[in-house]
Amino acid sequence: MEGLKASEKYMLTIREASAYFSIGEKKMRRMAENNEGGFGIFCGNRYLIIRPLMEQYFKELAEKGDSQDAESTTG
């Protein structure tokens, strides 16, 4: 099981998610603690990131940002 790539795993540790999404570990931990997108769970003594939900969260943020940019340029 240790041979799985991060892209093949369903859940990632903070360190794995940080490397996979190119986000600092402190920021990733804060995001998991706030659990804004419902992607972080506290299991035992650590946070785990549900990778597909995190990807969906970023996708929604990007789409939301694109629509805000389009609205601001139409004036």
Image (cartoon, rainbow, N blue to C red):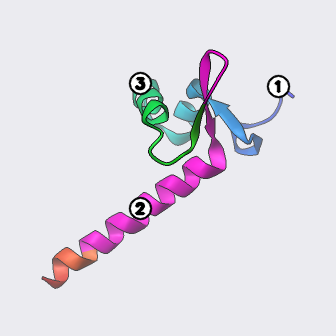
Please provide percent x and percent y for residue 3.
83, 29
Check residue 64 for magenta coloring: yes
Callout 3, which amino acid? Lys
Callout 1, which amino acid? Glu
Give the residue drawn at x 62%, y 15%.
45
- Please state which of residues 34 and 61 is positioned toward the viewer in this rendering: 34
Within 10 Å of disc 3 (Cα), the crowding (few <14, some 14-19, many 20+) is few
Callout 2, which amino acid? Ala
Give the residue drawn at x 77%, y 44%.
8
Please provide percent x and percent y for residue 5.
75, 37
Mark 1: secondary structure: loop
Question: Which residue has dot 2 on it?
Answer: 62
- State how many labels appear: 3
Q: Which residue lies furthest to the bottom in this view?
A: 74
Give the residue drawn at x 73%, y 42%.
10
Is the magenta region chiefly helix, strand or loop?
helix
- Please indicate whether residue 16 sits to the left or right of residue 2 in the image: left
Give the residue drawn at x 25%, y 71%.
69
- Please indicate whether residue 33 sits to the left or right of residue 42 in the image: left
Q: What stretch is highlighted in magenta?
A: 42-69
Question: Which residue has dot 3 on it?
Answer: 26
- Please indicate whether residue 19 sits to the left or right of residue 34 in the image: right
- Please indicate whether residue 67 sits to the left or right of residue 3 in the image: left
Closer mark to the observer between disc 3 and disc 1: 3
The N terminus: image quadrant:
top right
Q: Which comes sooner in the sequence, label 3 or label 1?
A: 1
CA–CA distance between discs 3 and 2?
21 Å
Mark 3: secondary structure: helix
Mark 2: secondary structure: helix
Q: Residue furthest top?
A: 45
Q: Which numbered marker is on residue 2?
A: 1
